[in-house]
Amino acid sequence: MQIVITDWALQSYIKLSQQFTETEYSNLLRPNVELLSDYPHHQKFKDDKFWGPCKDKGGKIIREGYKMKWHNIGPGNVQLRLLVVITDETAYLCNAYVKNNANKDFREMAKLKDKISLIKEGRYIFRGELL
């Protein structure tokens, strides 16, 4: 599977880079994201503490929207989330954020619905891909 880095992902990485250490990025975050190349076959995608479908405030699954989850990351021991859109054998890395409450999660899910539409229309900024 192709892994596309969108501008949303790049901007959130820059914004959140103080939330995790370089070691965590190199040894945990980046390798986990690279697992998308073997989606859905890698065992980690069966772990609901790591991977799951996105759901809106009403509990409805957002089609093609997924999130990677990490707990106790960085000096602040934050919960880090990365939203991913999977469509047409491509994983689009969208935004990452610190989950500090349920309302933050629901706001990010609402924004993800818009991003899914923009991706399908080809209206996103391509910043690269992971190989």
Image (cartoon, grey):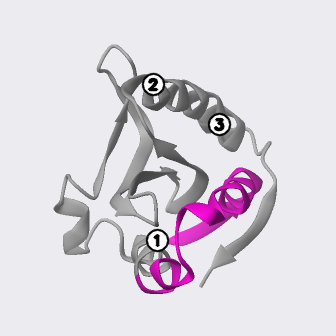
Q: Residues within 10 Å of mark 1 (few under 14, many from 20)?
A: some
Reply above or below: 131 against 11: below
Q: Which residue is drawn at 59% across and 85% down?
A: 131
Closer to the camera: disc 3 or disc 2? 2
Label 3 with label 1: CB-CB less than 8 Å: no
The kind of residue tagged 2 is Phe
User: Residue 27's spot in the image, x, y percent?
Assistant: 43, 86
Other-residue count near label 3 (Cα within 10 Å), few / some / many at <14 / 14–19 / ≥20: many
Q: Which amino acid does label 3 sit on?
A: Lys
Q: Quadrant of residue 31?
A: bottom left
Q: Is mark 1 on a helix, strand or loop?
A: helix
Specify the quadrant of the image occupied by residue 4.
Answer: bottom right
What residue span does the magenta drawing correspond to? 1-27
- Distance between the Cα atoms at labels 3 and 2? 14 Å
Specify which label sits upstream in the sequence, 3 or 1: 1
Q: How far apart are marks 1 and 2 (CA)?
A: 22 Å
Residue denoted by label 2: 106
Q: Is residue 23 magenta?
A: yes
Decide which of tag 1 and tag 2 comes sooner along the chain.
1
The label shown at residue 115 is: 3
